[in-house]
Amino acid sequence: MVFVIKFTEEKRVRLATVLQCFNAISTLCSLFLVAGGIFIKARVEDKVALIESYGSVDGLCYTLIAFGLLGVGLNVFGIKVSSDSKDPETRSKGMVMVLYMGLTALYCLLVFCAGITTFAHKMHLRQAFDKGITGAMNKYQYGGYLKAELDLLQMQYRCCGSEGPEDWFRIQWINKKYLNRDSPRIISKMTDGRYTNADVPFSCCNMRYNRPCIHHSITTIGRHYNFQYRGSQKHIIYQTGCKEALMAYFGGQVLETVGGTIMVIWVFQLAVAFGVRYLQTAIKSIDPADPTGDSEGHLLPPGQKAKDTEGGNASKKGKEKKPKTKKFGKKK
């Protein structure tokens, strides 16, 4: 047998107790996973207009909730099985332990895949935020819900543009009906029928900066008294891009925390899978005549090589013990 451990009744009870504790911890982590899925869904719902391909993020939330609920059910079942295993009268030698062991092994595999998927989802979320914010910026001039959502985002997360405030310099975010198209200054800033200038919306203004906000023609030297858009004065406008600000929160804090929790669940479930295997084989090998007697637990069944060796030795002994027969010739 491979990785054989000898168990007394006391050791079997102790192993069952440890498995109960691991199941209880995994249950709490699974509940946290459910809460994490609901939290991500609620937070992402607020920014759904700024996320491209929102359905995939929604799918991740539902996956986390489903895995959390499945983990809660499996671990509660595990607590019951481990509790029954402590008593010789209630412990099961049959399919219950085998079923629980199989479900735990399968859940370990699924949890590991979910953890990898959660960490890998950060790259997809980054791209979704980049496309969503850029798309909203291009529609900013038309006002309405997207304008309000983007202004609120920049003020809440203290960011500007997708990559930075320079993103606003390259698009027309001021509606033409608010531009005097007869003005030489406006005409000089028109490119292919679009008005572009070193302007940013008011929501990019740093509220902690002492000076009244400057957010039009901010790079034009001499346009504003005692101001140049460089050095510390650049921070009159938020310099962090909103994509990075959102990723620092959703990717850095939320997804990494949830992904870390998933991997913790995986470690505990893996330990439970090994423990249940030892407990199942230890209970199975108990002598029915002595329910509290000693037994052996193992991870893997007896190897084929060992069986072949035993069979070979037995055949050799048989050959050695086989009596020799004498041949008698016929008398002439």
Image (cartoon, rainbow, N blue to C red):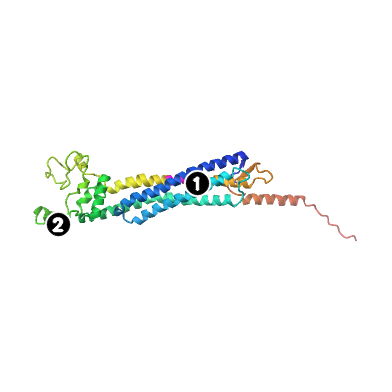
Tell me residue 18's x, y (percent): 54, 41
Compared across the picture, whether 144 is left or right of 58 comes to left
Task: Give the mark toward the camera: 1 or 2.
Answer: 2
| Left or right: 238 in relation to 273 | left
Residue 268 in the magenta stretch? The answer is yes
Relative to the observer, which residue lies in front, 304 or 48? 48
Query: Which three-letter amino acid code belongs to the residue tagged 2?
Result: Lys
Q: Is residue 73 in view?
A: yes
| Residue at position x 53%, y 43% in the image | 20
Does the magenta stretch mainly form a helix, a strand or a loop? Answer: helix
Disc 1 residue type? Gln
Q: Is residue 182 positioned above or below 77 on the image?
A: below
Name the residue beneath numbered marker 1.
269
Relative side of 267 to 161, left or right = right
Tell me if I can see residue 1 in this picture.
Answer: no
Kindly report the distance in space between the C-alpha atoms of the residues bearing marks 1 and 2: 63 Å
Query: What percent of the width, then of the height, locates residue 151?
Result: 24, 49
- Residues 200 and 328: in front is 200
Numbered badge on residue 177:
2
Residue at 77% of width from left, 50% of height from top? 321
Query: Which residue range is magenta in the image?
Result: 261-270
Residue 99 relative to residue 323: left or right:
left
Residue at (59% x, 52% y) in the render: 95
**213 in magenta:** no
* Residue 215 percent location from the top left of the image: 17, 46
Q: Position of residue 108 (x, y in %)?
A: 49, 49
Residue 194, numbered circle: none
